[in-house]
Amino acid sequence: MTSETSTPPDSSAAVRTRDLIYRWPKSSTRLHFPDLDLSAGRHLFIKGASGSGKSTLLSLLGGMLRPASGSIALLGQDLGPLSNGQRDRFRADHMGVIFQQFNLVPYLSTLANVTLPCRLSAQRQQRTHPSARAQATALLRDLAIPESHWQQPVGRLSVGQQQRVAAARALIGQPELILADEPTSALDADNRDRFIDVLLTLAHRSASSVIFVSHDQSLARHFDQELVLEVRS
């Protein structure tokens, strides 16, 4: 694996990793990741072929997987000593995650899906102004979800609309870090670029750092920094 970054390490890093290695359970295969330094409010694009470890790295940063060795510090917090429950709480309070398959709750309304993080995190709830519902409706408007869809079960929305709802859910409550795992893979080029522009504009408004994973090199131009993961032979 090789790394390309456009900025030096920053003492105010939102993300800092060192000597990170992951090994799948019951497997001798080991993924070695380059060191990361991402300053608060900056945006990182991660590209790599299938098998290079893009989604695995995002899961490590989100605390959903534990490394075999190495260290991960997010917002000054070392993830190493934290229990699984503490990692879940840290993620709920400080991170918005946009999954490739969106992971929306199909029987909840569009609005309820967006406000869900505020029901799971008092910190996210407190950072909404003037209320979680008000911020959710503002995000849905920014992301061009018609008001007529807000009370509908989210499963009735188109794929593109569900993607934007997932982005609104990740952004609500001004989390310091947004993790996005190939959320634009089902979109055409125009809609892909439009989605990223809106996502990064809203993240910038909240001073959130963004880590965006994709196999599409053309998207790198939207981001401050770039990291390229390569499959070792």
Image (spheres, helix red, strand yellow):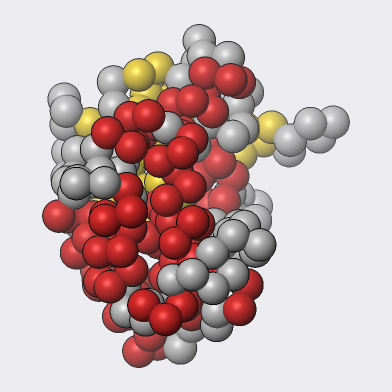
Image location (x, y in percent) of residue 11:
16, 25
The residue nearer to you, when weighing 163 against 42, is 163
Residue occupying the point 23% across, 31% down? 13
Q: Is residue 177 above or below residue 89?
A: below
Q: Quick check: can you spot residue 89?
A: yes
Image location (x, y in percent) of residue 52:
58, 53
Q: Is residue 201 left or right of residue 48?
A: left
Q: Is residue 225 left or right of residue 219?
A: left
Image location (x, y in percent) of residue 189:
40, 87
Residue occupying the point 46% across, 78% down? 149
The residue nearer to you, when weighing 65 against 172, is 172
Q: Quick check: can you spot residue 44?
A: no
Q: Is residue 47 above or below residue 9?
A: below
- The furthest residue to the right: 26
The residue nearer to you, when weighing 22 against 28, is 22
Q: In which quadrant of the rendered view does residue 125 lie?
A: top left
Image location (x, y in percent) of residue 140:
33, 68
Total marks shown come to 0
Q: Is residue 108 left or right of residue 73?
A: right
- The furthest residue to the top: 81
Residue occupying the point 51% across, 14% down? 82
Residue occupying the point 37% across, 81% down? 146
Q: Is residue 201 left or right of residue 60?
A: left
Q: Is residue 173 above or below residue 227?
A: above
